Amino acid sequence: MADLQQAVVVRRAEHTDVDGLVACSSALFAEDAGTRDPSVNVDWPRQHGPQRFTAGMDDPSRLVLVADCNGEVVGHLVGVLGDASEMKPVKVATLVSMYVQPSFRRSRIGGRLVAEFLGWAKQAGAEGAEVTAYSSNDQAVRFYERNGFAPQSVTLQTSL
């Protein structure tokens, strides 16, 4: 486990990482939304990911991180900084998506990605951070709670 932690570098994504980011995002969609929300287009990462990841790397209000193991993207995190508004007069950073390949889980890579995100958010002036997880994804909810997040609201949904 320690060897795996040392072999993986968490860093900002580069344009050469786009294919790896799309692969990780596709795996996330298939594993998470694809099994929990039939309304999600699981092909979205392949269809729109390359331009979204590229644009995110060039946007100072976005953070795109990769977990790199010997040149292979084995995980990613995307975050965005929201501006304060009159209704909510504080900057909040949103963890938009995160994924670590199954064979790299339980080696603290996810925690390292979250720590980088929280450090970036704080340095950017955010007063809080948020993430959304499917309520049926107990593992994700527990992971985020272990990393300092706490439930604040619940979104209820019905099909029409």
Image: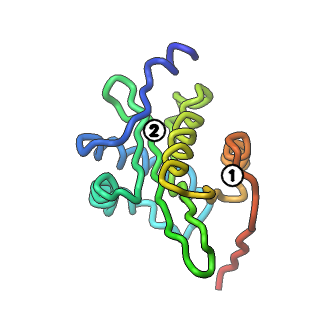
* Image quarter hosting the C terminus: bottom right
Where in the figure is residue 60, as x and y percent of width and height? 35, 56
Q: Is residue 48 visible?
A: yes
- Estimate how packed mark 2 is, as few (under 14), some (14 to 19) or many (20 or more) residues with alpha carbons within 10 Å: many
- As drawn, the residue found furthest toward the bottom would be 160
Q: Amino acid at mark 2?
A: Gly
Q: Which residue is mark 2?
A: 75
Question: First in sequence: mark 2 or mark 1?
Answer: 2
* Residue at image location 54% in from the left, 34% down from the top: 112
- The label on residue 62 is none
Q: Is residue 30 visible?
A: no
Q: Quadrant of residue 127?
A: bottom right
How many numbered badges does the structure rendering display?
Answer: 2
- Give how far across and how far down residue 93 sits, in percent: 54, 58
Nearest to viewer (mark 2 / mark 1): 2
Q: Which residue is mark 1?
A: 137
Helix, strand or loop at disc 2?
Answer: strand
141 to 51, vertically: above or below? above
On the image, the x and y values in percent for residue 43 come to: 39, 60
